[in-house]
Amino acid sequence: MRGVRVPLLCVCVSLLLRCTTSQAPEERDSHMECTDGYQWDLQTEHCKDVNECETIPEACKGEMKCFNHYGGYLCLPRSASIIPDPPGQPGSSFPDDVTEPYPCPLGYESQGGRCVDVDECEHDQHNCQPSQQCFNTQGGFSCQCPEGYRKVGTECIDVDECRYRYCQHRCVNVPGSFSCQCEPGFQLAGNNRSCIDVNECEMGAPCQQRCTNTYGTFLCRCEQGYELGADGFTCKDIDECGFSSFLCQFQCVNKPGKFSCVCPEGYQLQRARLCQDVNECETGTHTCTEGQTCVNTNGGHRCVDNNRCQAPYTQVSNNRCVCSVTKAACRDLPLSIVHRYMSMTSNRTVLSDVFQIQTTSISPGAHNAFRIRSGDDRGAFYIRQINNISAMLVLAQSVTGPKEYILDLEMVSINPILNYQSSSVLRLSIYVGQYTF
């Protein structure tokens, strides 16, 4: 506790009140009087202050302490101390009638008849510990601990501010102070204690494609068609074609961030993944001449001659050849040959109906039978007769293209009433494509 400042009153006034002479001049009898609180000192022949704290029994009562003062005394708390007025203020100089230097209080020194404060800190006249700081006061000094320290006994001990949870995240205690630190993904706020989120996406986060800021961190994301790499930053292309063979009907082509389907020559892409045959005969992209007929096939086309009749047959209409019974060469041959064309995909389901045959003329009492006359050496097809006038060509084995079958489908007509037998042939050209579509 700093001392209570009490003005130092200079109340000592040397008074030579009376000087009476009752005898001859050489026999003087002088009488001296001083003001209250002072008494005459015969040796110094000056008024001397009376120490009431020593002469008056129990001058101060209770917990009060007695402090002697010029011309009187003071009762102050025991923790108080008296600091004299600084030099130059009223009452700080000696009485005018004091001819000899009056001793200065502790903490002051006499200079030119005045009491001047002694700076104990500057002259190293203090007893502060090395861990303390010395502060000069009027008539004395005080030892204080630096900021961030507290006094324990006579030493200054560092205050661990981190014990008081000053920081939001981490606190680092240092001698006389502390500092706050934030977890990764945060930065120190303006108050140097709170932590605020850092938007890494705006500060150059190492995401290759997309960055999403989250509280205290960030996430890297990839565009559609890419997946995040093991490092969490880079994006690598997804090979969609490697996941499934059903993405495209024909072929899948992987591209950065996506994929596309392609079709073989003679086909066009439909609905992004299917392949549809291009009908060159309808689009006019075929190479057939005027004397030929364009026949569309799966993935291409064929050009066939308009007249495919061979001797002894003669052409009677489009695709129809007849062998007259009047010709000897026609005796064991079918009466007529009709040319037909069809296209079929590879690996078509087995035992599926392929082509229907039906007679165009019916004789009363005639019995008709259907068979494959030629062209099916390996037994890939067979005839299933539906009734007396029609039959169905059935696929018996799986066939793979590109391949061409020319089948002579014969209908034999027997009329027992008229004792008549004849036959006719439907020459079917089957073009098996290379693909299953």
Image: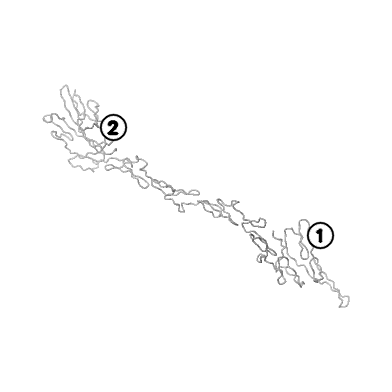
Q: Residues within 10 Å of mark 2 (few under 14, many from 20)?
A: some
What residue is rendered at 67% in x and 56% in y? 153
**Given the current orientation, which residue lies at the most extreme right position?**
23
**Given the current orientation, which residue lies at the most extreme top position?**
417
Q: Amino acid at mark 1?
A: Pro
Could you tell me residue 25's position as x and y percent?
A: 86, 78
Could you tell me residue 363's position as x and y percent?
A: 18, 25
Whichever of labels 1 and 2 marks the residue nearer the N terminus, that label is 1
Q: Nearer the viewer, residue 304 or 230?
A: 230
Q: CA distance from mark 1 to mark 2?
A: 139 Å
Number of labels in the image equals 2
Local SS, label 1? loop
Please state if 179 lies on the left or on the right of 107 as rendered. Answer: left
Q: Is residue 368 above or below residue 239?
A: above
Please name the residue that numbered disc 2 is placed on.
Answer: 350
Could you tell me residue 60's position as x and y percent?
A: 78, 58
**Given the current orientation, which residue lies at the most extreme bottom position?**
25
Q: Nearer the viewer, residue 360 or 405?
A: 405
Q: Nearer the viewer, residue 126 or 198?
A: 126
Could you tell me residue 174's position as x and y percent?
A: 58, 56
Query: Which of the 4 quarters of the picture holds residue 359?
Result: top left
Numbered mark located on residue 10 in the image: none
Query: Which of the 4 quarters of the picture holds residue 399?
Result: top left
Q: Nearer the viewer, residue 340 or 237?
A: 237
Which quadrant: the N terminus?
Answer: bottom right
Q: Amino acid at mark 2?
A: Val
Please name the residue that numbered disc 1 is placed on.
Answer: 57
Local SS, label 2? loop
